[in-house]
Structures are given as C-alpha cells and as structure tokens.
C-alpha cells in the first residue's frame, strides 16, 4: 500500500471515530431528533449545519465514510476492505433505525447493535492500516478483553436507547424501570470488563488507567443525565472519547508502562 493510500485509510479511521464523538455531542446537547426520523434529510441542512447542529454533521460525516468505503473497495478489493464496506452499510442502516429508537418506535437493542458495528468498523480500518497482527482476524478473535469491551459497548447503547429521547434514568436503590435495569446490567458488564483487564494486567495496564478515568466519567454521565436529561452536556462526547482511547489501548496492547 503506497503512502498516499495509507493516509487515505487513516482519514477513514479518523472519520469512523469522529462520527462516534459527534454522535456523543448530538446526545449531549439534545439534537438526536433535530432532523426527525427521515433519512436522508436535505431541507435546510446547510443552514442547520452553519447554525451548529451536530446531527447534520453526524449525517454528513457518515455519508462521507460510506463514499470512502466504496472507493477503498474499488482501489483495494481485499477481504478487510470489503468487510469495512459491509460494516459501514450495516452501521448506517442501524443508525437510521436508532432514530426510531429515540422516538420510542424501535427497541433499545437497535442502539446497542449500532454501537458495536460502529466500533467494529473503526477496528477494521485500523487493521488495514497498521498490519499489527500477522493474522488480523485470528488475533482479534483471541483478544479476550475485546469481547468484554463489546459487551460494555452493547449495554451502553442499550442504556441510551432505553432511556429514550431527553429522558432521565432516575435515581434508585432497586431498579423499577427497564432503563434502570439495563443501566445496572451495563455497570455489571463494566465490572466484568475491568476484571478481564486486571487479569491481563501485564498487557493492558494503560487500559486499566483509562478505564479508571472512564468509570469516574460514567458516574458523572449518570448524574448529568438525571440532572439535565435533555442536555447532559460535553460529558457525553468525553465519555465516547475515553471509550475510543480504551479501544485503542486494547488493540495496540499498550503496556507495560
């Protein structure tokens, strides 16, 4: 792969993660249904983009990611490139479906699956660029903490989906609603993930640091969502940012310090 093509694929990785962070911004500032449930939405999009509506930029970046994925398969029609395109398509389809989840017309599992696909897309392009594993897919399959990472991602998406559009989870001692029960399962999945990292500490001590910070951020997210469910703020994209850092530290096995 020549140098220009490598930079093109790196741009695709940046796009994939950028969409995740912008998606967090959409949730954090209450723009989830600012364009309704229709896709594509074209009415006044330039005006809304100029006004700073992150949902517009979320859709623009997602479209650009899809176009790039098609171009990459045309240029390099190999297994991982094709896998990347398939994941982009599936993520886009479930991304459209998540709008109905926010509107209360689709189950929360849609959001959970969408988040898994979004991160899987980024991983695929990382593997294409880095060649960090002799056998990329086999090495991913044997990366035990990654399975628990995806469990956390799935339950985090479920939590967002079940909470619904601009609704609080609510404080509780014993879960009384589906949103509270799913949040509890999400916390349990975080604990399981944490234990898997502790078990493989010699490989993932940087990951452990990120997780510790992320847990503190997660607590703040819970408080912010209940205090201001329509606009919990910048803590949501910050939460997504540290999720990305955790994933990168697992993929590159950052440790020991």
Image: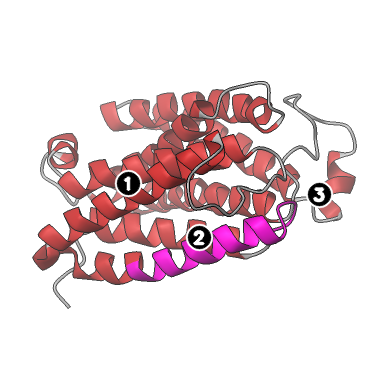
* Disc with the residue nearer the chain's start (2 vs 3): 3
Numbered tag placed on residue 189 in the rendering: 1
Image location (x, y in percent) of residue 180: 52, 43
- Locate residue 232 relative to residue 66 in the image: left or right: right
Quadrant of the drawing holding the C terminus: bottom left
Q: Which residue is mark 3?
A: 49
* Disc with the residue nearer the chain's start (1 vs 2): 1
Crowding at mark 3 (Cα within 10 Å: few <14, some 14-19, many 20+): some
> Which secondary structure, mark 2?
helix
> Which secondary structure, mark 3?
helix
- Seen in the picture, residue 90 relative to 27 is either above or below; the reply is above
Numbered tag placed on residue 71 in the rendering: none
Numbered tag placed on residue 239 in the rendering: 2
Mark nearer the viewer, 1 or 2? 1
Quadrant of the drawing holding the N terminus: top left
Q: Which residues are magenta?
A: 212-232
Image location (x, y in percent) of residue 143: 16, 45
The residue sitting at 72% across, 25% down in the picture is 39
* Disc with the residue nearer the chain's start (1 vs 3): 3
Q: Are marks 1 and 3 in contact (CB under 8 Å)?
A: no
- Locate residue 84 relative to residue 53 in the image: left or right: left
What is the CA distance from the residue labelled 1 to the residue labelled 3?
Answer: 37 Å
Q: Nearer the viewer, residue 82 or 191?
A: 191
The residue sitting at 49% across, 32% down in the picture is 114
């Amino acid at each position: 792969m020549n140098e220009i093509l490598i930079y093109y694929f790196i741009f695709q990785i940046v796009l994939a993660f950028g969409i995740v962070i912008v998606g967090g911004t959409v949730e954090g500032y209450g723009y989830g249904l600012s364009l309704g449930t229709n896709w594509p939405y074209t009415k006044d999009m330039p005006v809304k983009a100029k006004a700073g509506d992150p949902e517009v930029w979320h859709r623009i970046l997602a479209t650009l990611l899809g176009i790039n994925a098609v171009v990459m398969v045309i240029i390099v029609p190999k297994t991982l490139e094709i896998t990347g395109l398939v994941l982009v398509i599936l993520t886009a389809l479930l991304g459209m479906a998540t709008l109905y989840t926010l509107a209360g017309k689709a189950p929360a599992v849609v959001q959970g699956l969408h988040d898994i696909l979004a991160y899987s897309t980024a991983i695929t392009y990382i593997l294409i660029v880095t060649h960090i594993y002799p056998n990329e897919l086999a090495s991913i399959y044997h990366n035990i903490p990654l399975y628990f990472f995806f469990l956390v991602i799935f339950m985090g998406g479920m939590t967002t989906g079940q909470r619904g559009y601009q609704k609080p989870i609510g404080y509780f001692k014993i879960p009384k609603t589906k949103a509270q029960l799913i949040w509890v399962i999400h916390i349990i999945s975080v604990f399981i993930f944490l234990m898997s990292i502790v078990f493989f500490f010699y490989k993932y001590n940087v990951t452990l640091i990120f997780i510790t910070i992320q847990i503190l951020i997660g607590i703040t997210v819970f408080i912010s969502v209940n205090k201001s469910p329509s606009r919990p703020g910048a803590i949501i994209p910050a939460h997504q940012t540290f999720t990305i850092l955790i994933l990168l530290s697992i993929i590159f096995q950052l440790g020991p310090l």
